[in-house]
Amino acid sequence: MKKVLIFGGSGQIGRHLIRRLTKRNHLVTVVTRNLHKKGIILKTQGNPGYVEVVEANVFNENEINHLFENKDICINLVGILFEKKNNTFKNIHINFPTMLSQMSKKYNVKKLIHVSALGIEQSLDSKYAKSKLEGEKNIINNFSNLNILRPSVVFSVDDNFTTNLMTLLNLLPVFPLYYSGKTKFCPLHVSDFCEIILKVIEENISDKIIECVGPEEISFREIIEKLLISIDKKRTLISIPLKIANIFAYFFEKFPSPLITRDQIKLLKYDNILSGNNKSNVDIGVSAKLKFDDEILKYSYMWKKGGEYSKKKN
């Protein structure tokens, strides 16, 4: 049994991870900035008595420093895809993990697990990728016993990837493709990703950087085509010139939750697959088993005709 401190536990990965950790009798402390909004949800993710939810301003050292006392593991799941007010790439991807690594060292936490992103080393024209990489470098300098996990796109029924795409495909008669949809991904189901994290925790894996991928390599166009089949829709897929794509993205950035940003378009230039420079989840003994096609069929019915999210109800 280990005492685990989690930041970013209310997201897709965090909720699944809490369930898996408590099932294995690990004690979990989850930090949230809004106990009233997220406390009950987080409490019900794990076995009774194994989850403590604490409200704190996670950017204030004085509010969170005591939480590191007597903890075995600190897990950072905090990340953003676009900037909004004070939630900048610098604050979230550099300053925050740097602070966590310093606190982990100060309070003798045994292991720090930091979730980053696959493909950032080659995407240095992206602010997102540059901030992720700088954050990694800082925590490597500050803390020795750590694991940086770099997953490809993580998906499940409660993600913001497949669900948003299916919503758009349900509504739009024409769907735009950037770079002709050739960008390759290795979609990783959240259950498989949680298995990787558990392996790292329970077997004290020492590799500093581990790239995490699903069982297959597919292009973005193939992802869209598979989603269309799963929701029983036909749509026209068109390649958008880069200049036009950036104009659209500029206007999308004015919305609170943009569909796409100019920085994300830069990321799509690069494949999101194994680099060959670091160990992978397969190398540490965890082969992802859940295939994209099989898993999306378990929840895509909600976007079919008559489904909860279909624009056409029966």
Image (cartoon, grey):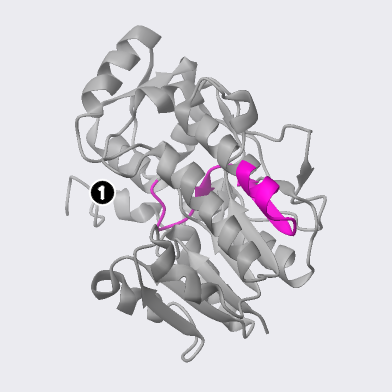
- For the point 62% across and 44% down, the residue is 138
Is 128 left, or right, of 187 in this rendering?
left
- Decide: is 7 above or below 165: below
Across and down, in percent, residue 29 comes to 49, 77
Q: Quadrant of residue 11?
A: bottom left
Q: Estimate how packed mark 1 is, as few (under 14), some (14 to 19) or many (20 or more) residues with alpha carbons within 10 Å.
A: some
Looking at the picture, how far across and down is residue 134, in whole percent? 58, 36
* Quadrant of the drawing holding the N terminus: bottom right
Stretch of the chain drawn in magenta: 138-160
User: Is residue 199 found inside the magenta-colored segment of the image?
Assistant: no
Q: Nearer the viewer, residue 169 or 163?
A: 163
Quadrant housing residue 112: bottom right
Against 3, residue 216 (above or below) is above
For disc 1, the marked residue is 305
Residue 102 position in % (x across, y down): 59, 57
Name the residue at the bottom extreme.
49
SS at circle 1: loop
Residue drawn at (37%, 45%) of the image: 231
Q: Amino acid at mark 1?
A: Lys
Left or right, 156 with respect to 202, comes to left
Q: Quadrant of the C terminus?
A: bottom left
- In the image: residue 19, left or right of residue 106: left
Question: Is 254 or 311 nearer to us in this picture?
Answer: 254
Q: Nearer the viewer, residue 143 or 311?
A: 143
